[in-house]
Amino acid sequence: MDPSAATGYATAELYEELTDGCTRDVRLEDLLYAAAERVPGIAPTRSEVEAERERPLARKQGLELAQGLLASEFLALPRHGAHLTRAMRRPTPEALARVDDFRRTGTADLGPVHVTRRGRAGILELSNPRHLNAEDGVTLGPTEWGVDLLLLDPEIEVCVIRGGVVDHPRYPNQRVFGSGINLTHLYHGKIDFLFYLVRDLGYVNKIYRGIADDGGDVEKLWIAGVERFAIGGACQLLHVVDHVIATQGARLYLPARREGIIPGASNLRLPRFVGDRAARQAILSGREWTAGDADAALLCDEVVETDALDDALHARVEALTSSGLVNAAANRRALRVGEEPEELFREYMATYAREQAYCHLSPALVRNLEEHWNAHRRSV
């Protein structure tokens, strides 16, 4: 499969047809499956991807490569790509169906994600205890629904994201922030290629830019409470939140070299925090940071002892909300104008969609997972 299969169809023409001339918002995953139905052979259908999901990564037929190439072509079109990135920031139907109940009760159990309103703060807690709060196909949807619920609740002024208590002999009854993508699920083929794109265009971009709304975008300040470690995708979140509080000794790193994939939008964002040379060391050579060390101050705003994180989070929320947050969203938007305008993000994601598709289906990724993760010895 390849986008070139759409003989007689220009990419822009196809996008126009699928979105009624850019008047209808269609999420990326729905867009690609609609394209597969409209133009057979241009991308895999839902049933074909479901069949691929039953195969381990090493035995996949490579059908998802066409999704990456077609997504890249859509995103590379300035007008249509901008429409797509905005469509991905719309509230999800799953969140809209729950928002009234959440506003009434102040809590929502979304399975692997729990969201709670406490005073003027909204807390999102990722709970995937068996896998050290890794992200996968099970957690992705609920995480975005949770982000939507916090942003849609007008009583919440500041959002907090943290990891739940894990079930692991090395960290008994302890919280960890997150261990990145679920490498075991990835090796066994349970994580679709679209996971990467939906994650960064969806909930990660909503944390960074807010929810897209016709009456005015809704965005809030975000605080990350980092305990034990922030690995891979969890470390990527530190690039989009407004304040990071980490516990002493927490490890922060992007094992992209050992995994064999592109670490989300870190290639775009990490250099702004640590400089180009250190970013290259992290992405290409596995450099780590440890909270409390001098160089880690570029990624952390505060470092506290493990038993002091709850108090630190409460104090930061109080400090941010005590004088009101009338100008918070305006200041965030002003900062983004210089550091990452939406056009730059769109262009990056067009490249990312193409290159990550090749990485995801590369034999080198399978080899890395076996050598560095012993994935072949782990059960799903």
Image: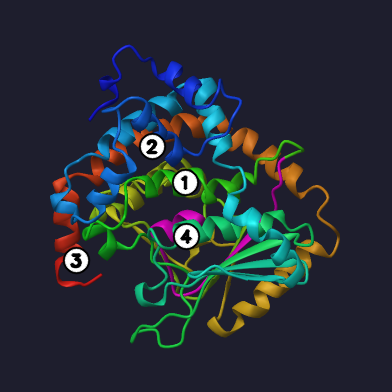
Tell whether label 3 touches label 4 (CB within 8 Å). Answer: no
Provide residue 198's location: percent of width, then percent of height: 45, 46
Q: Mark 3 vs mark 2: which is more N-terminal?
A: 2
For label 4, count other residues whose C-alpha is less than 10 Å away and answer few (under 14), some (14-19) or many (20+). few
For label 2, count other residues whose C-alpha is less than 10 Å away and answer few (under 14), some (14-19) or many (20+). some
Q: Which residue is mark 3?
A: 375
Numbered disc in front, either 4 or 3: 3
Q: Secondary structure at mark 2?
A: helix
State left or right for residue 257 relative to residue 34: left
Q: Mark 4 vs mark 3: which is more N-terminal?
A: 4
Q: Secondary structure at mark 1?
A: helix
Task: Out of 19 and 84, give the one closest to the viewer.
Answer: 19
Q: Mark 2 vs mark 4: which is more N-terminal?
A: 2
Q: CA distance from mark 4 to mark 3?
A: 32 Å
> Is 176 one of the magenta-colored residues?
no
For label 3, count other residues whose C-alpha is less than 10 Å away and answer few (under 14), some (14-19) or many (20+). many
Q: Amino acid at mark 1?
A: Asp
Q: CA distance from mark 2 to mark 4?
A: 45 Å
Task: Out of 240 and 279, give the one closest to the viewer.
Answer: 240
Residue 343 seen in the current view = no
Q: Which residue is mark 4?
A: 295
State left or right for residue 233 relative to residue 60: right
Provide residue 196's location: percent of width, then percent of height: 38, 47
Vertically, is 126 above or below 365? below
Q: Amino acid at mark 4?
A: Asp
Provide residue 192's location: percent of width, then percent of height: 32, 50
Range of magenta residues: 217-237
State left or right for residue 185 relative to residue 212: left
Numbered disc in front, either 1 or 4: 1
For label 1, count other residues whose C-alpha is less than 10 Å away and answer few (under 14), some (14-19) or many (20+). many
Q: Which residue is mark 1?
A: 200
Provide residue 273's location: percent of width, then percent of height: 51, 49
